[in-house]
Image: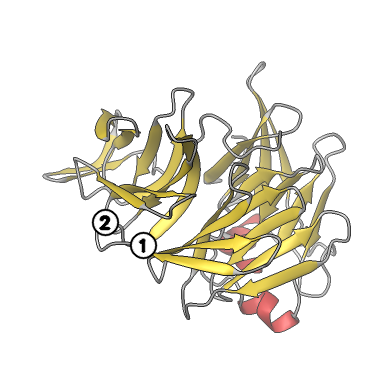
Amino acid sequence: LPTAISGPCDVSIGPDNFIYVQEFFANKIARFNQNTGEFTEYDIPFTVPGLDNFTLPLPGHAKFELLSCAIRTGYDGYMYFSNGAHNQIVRHDVHSGETVVFTPPPLLLSILGNLQPLNDLTAAPDGIYFTQTTGNQVTKFDYKTHKFTSWTVPTLLAIPLGIYYSQHDDGIWFLEFGASKVGRLDRHTHEIEEFDLPLNALQPLVVRAETVNQDGSTTLWFACTTSSTISGINTRTGAISVYQEPNAPTETVEVAQDLKGNVWATHILQNTLGVLNPKTGNVSVVVEPSVILDTPGITVPFYGESGIFGYAVGQPP
């Protein structure tokens, strides 16, 4: 990437079929042309509450605290990003390069709603849904009206984090990092249902894979950080599946799906990737080169694993 120490984090494919990356430390958006190998970077406006698109003339390092790391394509043809600790939604036009910031009300919650900045967002037909971690809410940004609507998670201090719209189930599924639960928001009734996770599936983080089962139901797959597991929930029955990483502790962070339906997971504490075959339940390990720490049981990757992207599950049709 052109910007040094930018911390590329989440990855997605844009409506123009180029790859887009959000830069964790630099507070930028990067477009990668996979045909030419060229990068183009766009600044995310650095704003103050109440002045969404008034950009403060601050040096780059002053923006590092935002820690933005979530990116998806909306059903309206724009790219959408979270804005970390600023608790904003960022809309990017891939054709004009215009980047616009939207802040959810009320003012106090917009400031305090995402102090654990690693929230997430997902695209649904009616808007962008995102989590407010310390606000304990799931919020919708309407494509047409630009209005925000929020629903409070029933469990206190749940810290909703990962979120995913299932096209098969038509529900908004989210992970409660603090409560170790999975929640489902009905887009039509706005009711929230919660599912408890077992003790071997603690602190779910990111949900980025959905596989189809033999009976036609689907399973959503997510990383459970503390328990070092790849876990899933059946969208029809709510049944939980948990698969232990063979080289735990791994500090499993994010998952992605390949074209064969395998679920891949990134690791913080190992220089490895985990690969789950949902049909067999087998979890294998892919070893990566280069480490910055190599001790018995823990091998920290030189690259600092975070995001992973494969088959574009959940993209607008």
What type is the residue that disc 2 sits on? Ser
Give the residue furthest to the bottom.
108
- The residue lying at 80 percent from left, 39 percent from top is 77
For badge 1, the amino acid type reads: Gln
Q: Is residue 10 left or right of residue 107?
A: left
Q: Is residue 95 left or right of residue 63?
A: right
Which of 240 and 284 lies nearest the eye of the viewer? 240
Q: Is residue 68 visible?
A: no
Check disc 2: other Cα within 10 Å, few if <14, some if 14-19, many if 20+: many
- Give how far across and how far down residue 20 sits, in percent: 65, 36
| Location of residue 122 with respect to 97 vertically, above or below | below
Q: Is residue 35 above or below residue 227?
A: above
Residue 41 at least partly seen:
yes
Q: Nearer the viewer, residue 29 or 273?
A: 273
Residues under numbered marks 2 and 1 in contact, where contact means CB atoms less than 8 Å apart: yes
Write down the quadrant of residue 213 in the picture.
top left
Q: Which residue is mark 1?
A: 203
User: Which circle marks residue 227 in the picture?
Assistant: 2
Q: Is residue 69 left or right of residue 46?
A: left
Look at the picture and state if 35 lies above or below 172: above
81 or 74, which is in the foreground?
74
Classify mark 2: helix, strand or loop. Answer: loop
Q: Quadrant of the N terminus?
A: top right
